[in-house]
Amino acid sequence: MRVRDLMTAKPITVDPELHNASLRSWNVNVQRQLGGSVAAMVVYYGSRGTDLRISRNLNQPINGVRPYPTVSAASPIQPGATLGNITQAESTGFSRYHAVSATVSKRSRDLLFDTSYTWSKSLDTNSLNSSNFNVQDGYDISNQYGLSDFDARHRFVRDPRQQQHRPRSEEEAEHAAGHREQQTLDQHLPHESESRSPKRRTYRKLLAPRRRTRQQKIGDVRARDQ
């Protein structure tokens, strides 16, 4: 590194009128049932970002000459030093996003298959604003408007998922609950080869519900009332 570069001042500043970034988004979708187990959906997405943070060079050379070549001689900090880039963080960036997506869903018993295709286009003034990357032309921000660094024009996704089976009726729900209860009982009981052992009968006796029966009394009702 040269001594001249060490003596060059490269200040960093923040715009006094810096605003918080904002993003507005919207979408419109149309859904259609195609048969008993197939559904289709078409969606349009859109967004608009304003007051996005951006870094630009206030001392960018014009025809090879910097507007501010040196620090003022009256400055208390490095008076008369050579000035390099003056990087300013400000909220003059903006972005746009548009996308159209088509999705087809098919249900097969406990499986759900989603197949989707998305066409999208992302535009902005500077995608690397968090890396202190200055725009190429600090005097014309709108001229930097173009495709985003993360722009992905086409996207195809196929997603199979498993869904929990839902009983269609109360009778089927009771049957499923009884089946799960029987499976739990079989896990705690001995194997079928021990079904006739006293241990198996003891387990069934302990797990069996208690039945309460009313005590029967036989006699003349009139005799008890006297």
Image (tube, rainbow, N blue to C red):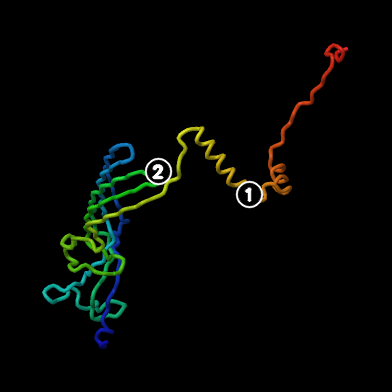
Would you place residue 166 above or below residue 69 in this image? Answer: above
Q: Which mark is residue 76?
A: none
User: Where, by quadrant of the figure, is residue 17 drawn?
Assistant: bottom left
Left or right: 68, with 24 as reference point:
left
Looking at the image, which residue sits at the far left? 63
Residue marked by disc 1: 192
Q: Secondary structure at mark 1?
A: helix
Q: Secondary structure at mark 2?
A: loop
Instruction: Please tell me which residue is depicted at 45% across the width and 35% down the height of the picture.
Output: 168
Instruction: Please tell me which residue is depicted at 19% across the width and 77% down the height of the picture.
Output: 69
User: Where, by quadrant of the figure, is residue 121 drawn?
Assistant: bottom left
Left or right: 141, with 205 as reference point:
left
* Image quadrant in which the N terminus is located: bottom left
Under mark 1, the amino acid is: Glu
Q: CA distance from mark 1 to mark 2?
A: 32 Å
Question: Is mark 1 in CB contact (under 8 Å) with mark 2?
Answer: no
Q: Which percent across, then down, holds residue 84?
A: 23, 77
Under mark 2, the amino acid is: Arg
Q: Which percent across, then down, holds residue 191?
A: 63, 51
